Every structure is written in structure tokens, then in C-alpha cells.
Amino acid sequence: MKTYKLTAYESKGNVIIDESLLAATDEDAIEKGQIILEGKELLETTHRLASPSGKLLLFHS
């Protein structure tokens, strides 16, 4: 399992969530990240999901 970083921001740049999640693959991490964002109603906020190597997997601005 790898550790991925999920972050979401308010329009003024304040951090709303800053969470780590564990996933076996990038695809699993994307799915888990989207579930977290959907559950917290943050899909339309600025957010990003980064892999352990720094690859940007999800991004919305």
C-alpha cells in the first residue's frame, strides 16, 4: 500500500481538508479520493490528489 495526499481548498486558499489515504494503485487512490470528496460535498472545490512520487492524479480548480 502507498500513501497518497488529498487536499481541498476554499476559494480564498484556506485548506478545508488535508488527508492521507492508503491505496494499492493510483486508480484505487483516485476512486477513494473521489469518494471522500463526494462524501464531504467538495467535488466542486479546488482540490488535488498526489501520489507518493508527486504525480498529480486528481485536480480541480
Image (cartoon, grey):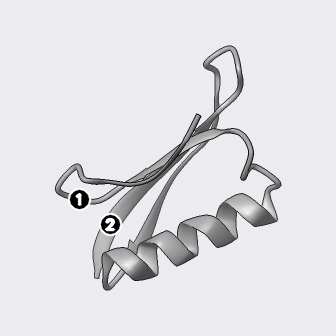
Task: Identify the amino acid type marked 2.
Answer: Thr
Q: From the top left corner, tell me how far across and down residue 58 is, in percent.
A: 46, 55
**In which quadrant will I find the N terminus?**
bottom left
* Disc with the residue nearer the chain's start (1 vs 2): 2
Q: Is mark 2 on a helix, strand or loop?
A: strand
Position of residue 43 relative to residue 12, above or below, is below
Which residue is drawn at the image coordinates 71% and 21% (left, top)? 11
Residue sitting at x 32%, y 85%? 24
Which residue sits at x=54%, y=77%?
A: 31
| Element on which disc 1 rests | loop
Which numbered disc covers residue 52?
Answer: 1
Query: Label 2 near label 1: C-beta < 8 Å?
Result: yes
Q: Which residue lies furthest to the left in this view?
A: 53
Query: Can you say whether 9 is above or below 33 in the image?
Result: above
Q: How many labels does the image show?
A: 2
Q: Position of residue 46 (x, y in %)?
A: 62, 36
Screen quadrant of the C terminus: top right
Q: Which residue is the site of mark 2?
A: 3
Within 10 angstroms of label 1, few (less than 14), some, or many (20 or more) residues? few
Mark 1 to mark 2 CA distance (whole Å): 6 Å
